[in-house]
Structure formats: C-alpha cells, structure tokens
Amino acid sequence: FILDDSPNLTIAKIRTRVRWMAGTGRPPAIVVADYLQLVTPETTGKDRSRATEVAEISRNLKLLAMEFEIPVVALAQFNRGAVGREPTVSDFKDSSAIEQDSNVIVLMHKPSEPDPEEVRSGNATARTGEIDLIVAKNRNGIAGRIVPLIFQGHYARLRSMGPKL
C-alpha cells in the first residue's frame, strides 16, 4: 500500500510511480485518485479553461488504466446544484469529459429525511443511516441499479444491508 499525498501531483508523477512499482515486480492492483479535480494539470495557461484541464486529467487517467491494465478509481466533485436531490452524471464539476471517459460511474446519494409526521402516518419510511450507490453508467453491464447501504460515519465505512454470512 502506497499513499502519495504530495502537493502538485500530476498524471506524469502518478504514471512514474506506477511504472516504478511494476518495475520492482509489485505492480499496483488499483490506483485511486482522491479527488480528480485536485490533480495538477500538466500544462497550464491563460487560454486554457478549467474544463479543458479537467478533461485532460480525466483522459490521462483513462490512458493510465489502459496502459497498465489496472482499475483507476477517480473520485470527483459535483456542482453545488446537485445538493438536496439525487445526483446525475451531468453534475460533475468542471467537465463533462469525466462522464465520457469513465467506464463505470457510481454515484453516492444520501436520501433526505422524510417528514416525521409522514413516517408516523405510514405514508413514508425513514431511511436514517442509509446511503444509496447508484450505478449511473456501466459500459460492460447494466446501469441504473441502486444499492442501498448502511452509512456508519463514526467508522467512516459503508456496510451491506444484507445478512451477515
């Protein structure tokens, strides 16, 4: 397990690290970028928009995954307009290229708390402590599936709602 939280991390630096790991006989099983919009673009300039920079980062993460044949998970920020409603793939901040480059997009959504009066009357069910994972895009499978999970914030984890095996 290698954690690299150095400032100004670029795709070239990530690629170099992955290449080094592969060269030592211990290639990574997965690369996680937390989060995509904090990766420093390779080139910057006055004529480049933030959307162009994020699109370049997104595309280069996709190329990294293809080059080393490993999954790359990139966490990304949403626009503020997505607050309070179920998110969609068009809510990514700074670039629609994230949606275009991704093979799988899983969105996290915490359902809003229903009015307690509606719960008491039986018109609504409380989903306190739950979070939904929404498979919004899946190039090689079925999209649209919603997976409800239990959110345990005090442990910083999500757990299955299914029976323990």
Image (cartoon, rainbow, N blue to C red):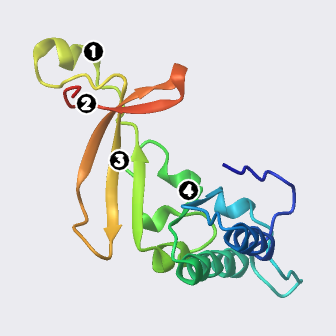
Q: Which residue is rendered at x = 86% and y = 62% of the image?
A: 8
Residue underneath mark 3 = 133
Judge depth for marks 3 and 1 and give the one in front: 3
Judge depth for marks 1 and 2 and give the one in front: 2
Q: Is residue 31 left or right of residue 12?
A: left
Q: Is residue 161 left or right of residue 9?
A: left
Q: Which label sits on residue 78?
A: 4
Residue underneath mark 1 = 116
Q: Is residue 122 above or below residue 75?
A: above
Judge depth for marks 4 and 1 and give the one in front: 4
Mark before the other along the chain sequence, 3 or 1: 1
Q: Amino acid at mark 4?
A: Phe
- Please tell me whether mark 4 sits on a helix, a strand or a loop: loop
- Please tell me whether mark 1 sits on a helix, a strand or a loop: helix
Q: Is residue 21 left or right of residue 93?
A: right
Is residue 72 in view from this perspective? yes
Q: Amino acid at mark 2?
A: Met
Quadrant of the image occupied by residue 12: bottom right
Q: Which residue is rendered at x = 23% and y = 55% of the image?
A: 145
Q: Which residue is rendered at x = 53% and y = 75% of the image?
A: 96
Give me the C-alpha separation between circle 3 and circle 2. Answer: 12 Å
Measured as percent of width and height from the top left, residue 50 is found at 73, 74
Q: Which label sits on residue 154?
A: none
Q: Residues within 10 Å of mark 4 (few under 14, many from 20)?
A: some
Mark before the other along the chain sequence, 4 or 1: 4
- Please tell me whether mark 3 sits on a helix, a strand or a loop: strand
User: In front here: 16 or 102?
Assistant: 16
User: In front here: 115 or 19?
Assistant: 19
Disc 3, disc 4: CB below 8 Å?
no
Q: Residues within 10 Å of mark 2 (few under 14, many from 20)?
A: few
